[in-house]
């Protein structure tokens, strides 16, 4: 259902939600915007030319999270998390899409991650579409878009004085009870805004045939070339909304076993006890990062594991650009080199 | 996998039943663990298949992935052999009978025993990676299962005779009419009556028949790498050659991302793969 939300009514609506929910929305923290809990003085920041620095995946998979508690006599206890029902407001479509991608890894028939599942079930996501393209973003290139609805319970389109609210689920609808329904004309205006935003997004690289190019050039010197200036800092994966790798470590003083974000860009990530490392240099590690997103996700669920948010481009300290890397990959020859 | 409560990250409580050194240089130690709770034992053995592994947990130290080295019929315990390498395995080596320990598992797919029924088995192991092959041999060798399989050929190589594991059983197996056993060490030793040489060479020399047979290879990466082509040379089809892989692991349930081989996770989709499957995956080992 399409509803109209007056912008001046927004602060009241947000504060009203606080009675029943923890509300997270983008706010200014130092030089960047972050998803922070709403307080009576919170100021919503959505006018930056790009997304929050840390993706909202952190609200589902925190940078550090307790998995297990050690009991006094050498036993183990489930870590109880205390999740209050919550709303993530003004999540961008690329980041909501990323959460859906991560669902396919954390919620599976064989094993479901109980910590992820509980947070997902207790969260309502209200998306804010991007009517202006952000710097470095390339969502349409990877098959998603500035008004992509996947992973959202409701989607807002900025129409100047008002937002058009598209409620996509029951949960999403429940947040906007009492708003007036949008007239057909407003819906058409919103559709035009959405289409214009879509058209303004540049095509960053060609995805057709990209998977095969990357697969078949597994042993190519291409990987050497594109990883040459990489510092191995891992920020591309740390800030990536679809990167989910974690390490498990024991915090002895807290008597807890925790998981922490980890990255395939670090040497110790794959280093084995024998000293053998399947990915001994940044060449293999870069290959893993790109292949995971543009080959392995496709093998697993037939979706590209990159939502085009542009963070890895924006924050790389040496200016490595995944778009340029993939454009270069498309110029590679097809070659068959599956060595035993 | 039995889980303590709902979380697959919480180990089930176990106790050390027996702890003893497996090798003369004390680098390998075997732990036999018993379950604190009968329901955990039931859940474990309902799910268990030779070739699977567990994560052994020492609170405050971490977890280590180890292959199960016992067959279900042996009794209400689970056996592991740990090589002393880092902090967790050092902690495992310091455990003695009666000590508490945590365990998660059984994890992974294990050997496709149903598919192998009616076939001869060629079991090829090297070093401490022989543990799951030991579990496999004990399973197949048991009177209730033995008739399901054809000829049993075992090739087991270690660097020295002192590093050979499970010596009592292997010595007894030599007496068996229905098993062909080839033991090897890398360099000559006095009084050694078996092969001297590397496993791939021994396999080539022994030349097991590929007729209605499957071969299983578990060993250090270098041994596996050179043994697989020998089996292909001998006429084994890639679909009939199996190996068990290892990579660094953390979660054991396909969530933490660490042990991927292309789109597969060794912990969840493996650790047992056929050569045909491996040939379709990137060489990222």
Image (tube, helix red, strand yellow):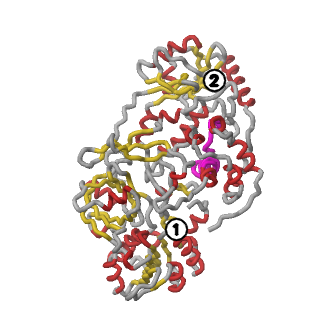
Q: Mark 2 highlights which residue?
A: A48
Measured as percent of width and height from the top left, residue A22 is found at: 44, 24
Image quarter where the C terminus of chain B lies is: bottom right
What is the span of residues highlighted in magenta in the rendered image? A289-311
Q: Check the residue under mark 2 and report the chain it is in.
A: A
Is B32 on the left-hand or right-hand side of A218?
A: left
Image quarter where the N terminus of chain B lies is: bottom left
Q: Mark 1 highlights which residue?
A: B221
Residue nearest the viewer, comparing A86 with B226: B226
In the image, is residue A9 above or below residue A34? above
Toward the left, the furthest residue is B98
Q: Check the residue under mark 1 and report the chain it is in.
A: B
The secondary structure that dominates the magenta segment is helix
- Number of numbered discs on residues: 2
Q: Which residue corresponds to the image point at 40% horizontal and 83% vertical from the top-left?
A: B179
Q: Which residue corresponds to the image point at 77% horizontal and 57% vertical from the top-left?
A: A333
Q: Quadrant of residue B235?
A: bottom right
Is A166 on the left-hand or right-hand side of B69?
A: right
Q: Quadrant of residue A243?
A: top right
The answer to whether residue B118 is visible is: no
């Amino acid at each position: 259902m399409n509803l109209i939300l007056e912008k001046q009514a927004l602060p009241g609506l947000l504060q009203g939600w606080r009675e029943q929910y923890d509300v997270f929305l983008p706010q200014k923290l130092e030089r960047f915007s972050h998803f922070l809990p709403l307080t009576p003085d919170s100021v919503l920041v959505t006018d930056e030319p790009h997304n929050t620095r840390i993706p909202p995946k952190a609200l589902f998979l925190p940078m550090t999270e307790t998995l297990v508690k050690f009991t006094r006599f050498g036993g183990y206890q489930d870590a109880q998390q205390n999740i209050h029902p919550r709303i993530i407001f003004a999540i961008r479509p690329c980041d909501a899409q990323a959460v859906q991608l991560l669902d396919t890894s954390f919620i599976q028939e064989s094993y479901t991650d109980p910590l992820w599942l509980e947070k997902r079930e207790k969260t309502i996501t209200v998306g804010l579409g991007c009517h202006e393209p952000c710097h470095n973003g390339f969502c349409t290139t990877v098959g998603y878009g500035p008004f992509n609805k996947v992973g959202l319970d409701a989607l807002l389109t900025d129409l100047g004085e008002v937002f058009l609210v598209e409620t996509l689920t029951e949960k999403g609808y429940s947040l906007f009870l009492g708003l007036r329904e949008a007239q057909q004309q407003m819906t058409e205006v919103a559709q035009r805004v959405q289409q214009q935003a879509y058209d303004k997004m540049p095509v960053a690289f060609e995805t057709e045939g990209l998977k095969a190019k990357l697969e078949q050039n597994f042993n190519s010197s291409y990987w050497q070339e594109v990883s040459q200036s990489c510092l191995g800092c891992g920020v591309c994966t740390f800030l990536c909304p679809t990167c989910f790798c974690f390490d498990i470590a024991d915090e002895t003083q807290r008597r807890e076993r925790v998981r922490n974000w980890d990255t395939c860009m670090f040497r110790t990530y794959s280093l084995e006890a024998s000293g053998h490392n399947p990915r001994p240099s940044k060449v293999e590690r870069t290959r893993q990062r790109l292949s995971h997103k543009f080959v392995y996700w496709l093998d697993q669920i037939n979706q590209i594991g990159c939502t085009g948010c542009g963070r890895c481009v924006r924050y790389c300290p040496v200016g490595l650009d995944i778009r340029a890397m993939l454009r270069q990959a498309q110029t590679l020859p097809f070659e068959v080199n599956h060595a035993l | 996998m039995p889980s303590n409560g709902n979380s697959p990250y919480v180990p089930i409580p176990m106790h050390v039943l027996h702890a003893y050194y497996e090798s003369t240089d004390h680098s390998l130690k075997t732990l036999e663990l018993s379950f604190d709770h009968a329901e955990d034992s039931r859940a474990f053995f309902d799910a268990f298949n030779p070739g699977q592994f567990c994560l052994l947990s020492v609170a405050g130290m971490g977890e280590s992935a180890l292959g199960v080295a016992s067959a279900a019929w042996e009794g209400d315990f689970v056996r592991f052999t740990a090589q002393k390498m880092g902090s967790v395995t050092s902690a495992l080596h310091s455990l003695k009978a009666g000590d508490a320990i945590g365990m998660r598992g059984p994890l992974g797919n294990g050997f496709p025993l149903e598919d192998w029924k009616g076939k001869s088995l060629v079991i090829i192991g090297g070093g401490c990676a022989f543990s799951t092959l030991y579990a496999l041999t004990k399973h197949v060798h048991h009177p209730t299962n033995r008739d399901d399989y054809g000829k049993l050929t075992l090739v087991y190589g270690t660097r020295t005779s002192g590093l050979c594991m499970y010596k009592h059983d292997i010595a007894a197996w030599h007496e068996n009419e229905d098993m062909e056993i080839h033991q090897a060490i890398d360099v000559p030793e006095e009084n050694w009556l078996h092969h001297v040489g590397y496993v791939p060479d021994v396999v080539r020399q022994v030349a097991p028949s590929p007729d209605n047979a499957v071969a299983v290879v578990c060993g250090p990466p270098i041994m596996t790498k050179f043994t697989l082509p020998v089996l292909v040379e001998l006429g084994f089809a890639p679909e009939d050659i199996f190996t068990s892989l290892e990579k660094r692991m953390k979660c054991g349930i396909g969530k933490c991302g660490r042990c991927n081989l292309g789109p597969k996770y060794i912990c969840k989709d493996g650790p047992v793969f056929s050569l045909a499957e491996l040939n379709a995956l990137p060489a990222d080992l």
